[in-house]
Amino acid sequence: MDIVHHGALHGVTGSCHQLMITESRSLLVDCGMFQGKDAKDRDEEKIDFSLDGIQALVVTHVHLDHVGRIPYLIAAGFNGPIYCTPPTAKLLPIMMEDAMRVGVTRNRRLIERFLQDLRRHIRPMPYGKWHQLDGGIEMRFTPAGHVLGSAVVEFDHQGERFVFSGDLGSREQPLLKDPVSPERADMLVLESTYGDRNHEGRERRVQHLEDVLCRSLENKGVTIIPAFSVGRTQELLYEMNEIFERVGRRCKCDMLKAVDVIIDSPLAQRFTDLYESLSKYWDEEAQRVLRYDDQPLVFDNLVEVEDHHEHRDTIEYLKESKLPAVVIAASGMCAGGRVVNYLKEFLGNPTTDVVFVGYQAYGTPGRYIQDTDWVRLDGRRYDVRAETHQLSGYSAHADQSDLLRFVEGMQERPKAIRLVHGEARAKEALQSELEQRGYNVV
């Protein structure tokens, strides 16, 4: 077997890898959207490779940098099955519906037609079992710990085994099961997003979030958290629930009565409902919490904003009331979505806090807010006077120590490792660490 990379070999986004089983038969692993600088000078709608001989698409998880080009893939003539885990099978149509509405068309009839076609392609397969595909190929999904439904994918053909990590998660996440290392691999395709750094531990990141929330209470400011609708939003709700209860007990007050937590993302609300319905896929800690709190992602002062009119009213209310509030809104890199309107209104206010809980790709507004004192949003310059924070421990991606632990957890050393899904510096640092341990990075 061999691999042809159609994205994320030299960048972080646009994951798309073609596993060549023979010269005439192949499988596609992910078909993601390019974002930030990776999207420069690219025609996003164009599938720039032949579909001849591609017998199936295998999806590792539902983030757009791994699935965002699926509508264009189907439009280009792909008509094979889409294999994924059962949670991904439920999450994928919702993600694609939103992506179609935002980036392709708002025509409801066209979107419904696409979704019907998409559901016809989807073939959910359970974790932990080898599945026989056409042509004598065997495939298995194991937990990746990145978002609900995320998977490491193993392929076996005539004794040769190729493994795609997809995106691996940190072992510090409270809702998801830890990544599972494969037994062996002739080729391990490994993500490297944070290959050059380690995240702060969970205890420290929760304390950091608590400090920001308390600052909002003290200065009656707005805390803006740009967060992806699936994964980080649900984890933040879970840990905010714990923080509010703990601080309330310590201060002998009801913290929730003093601050509104606003979820301004209908998509995030839909995903949160699905997360709760799929709680059997949560890890042991979250399962224990469910025994005494049947809704750990919901609390009293949680405000869910639905339509655009309500969204505008919420911004005006926050401007006029000058009361403390926490706003969680998409998109995670501030490249679009409702979070942009909050940033326009509140970035210039020193009592505002902007909390980044995920990776900000080079060239995205989130990266500019993180690194500089101004940002351009919808063509207009905005000064950044807000306090900015990076809570790296909330990243959905494994850090360097997690990535090394994943490789070293294999029963047999992989014969070769190929690093993808990372900036050059991150890949070089991870490659150096792996090679010092005697691994063959190609």
Image: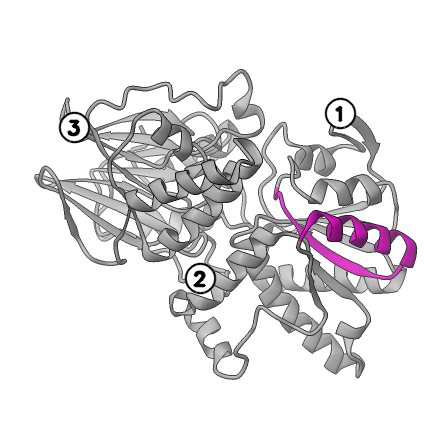
Is 382 left, or right, of 163 in this rendering?
right
- Per the image, the residue denoted by label 2 is 176
How dense is the environment of label 2, judged by Cα within 10 Å: few (below 14), some, or many (20 and up)?
many
CA gap, disc 1 and disc 3: 46 Å
What residue span does the magenta drawing correspond to? 307-332
Q: Residues within 10 Å of mark 1 (few under 14, many from 20)?
A: few
Disc 3, SS: loop
The amino acid sitting under disc 3 is Arg
Image quarter where the N terminus lies is top left
User: Does the image show residue 196?
Assistant: no
Looking at the image, which is closer to me, 106 or 64? 106
Q: Which mark is residue 25?
A: 3
Residue found 77% across the figure and 79% down from its top = 254
Question: In the image, is residue 312 part of the stretch drawn in magenta?
Answer: yes
Residue drawn at the location 48% of the way across and 43% of the way down: 97
Quarter of the rendering containing residue 145: bottom left
- For label 1, the residue is 379
Measure the alpha-carbon separation of dots 1 and 2: 39 Å
Where residue 393 sits: x, y (%)?
58, 54
Q: Relative to 303, say whether 51 is above or below.
A: above
Q: Distance of mark 2 from mark 3, alpha carbons?
A: 34 Å
**Tags 1 and 2 touching, CB below 8 Å:** no
Q: Are marks 1 and 3 in contact (CB under 8 Å)?
A: no
Q: Is residue 286 above or below residue 49?
A: below
- Residue 255 lies, with reference to residue 382, above or below; the image says below
Q: Amino acid at mark 2?
A: Leu
Q: Which is nearer the N-term, disc 2 or disc 3?
A: 3
Q: Secondary structure at mark 2?
A: loop
User: Residue 47 in the image: x percent, y percent?
Assistant: 38, 22
Q: Quadrant of residue 9?
A: top left
- Residue drawn 53% across the image and 24% down it: 39
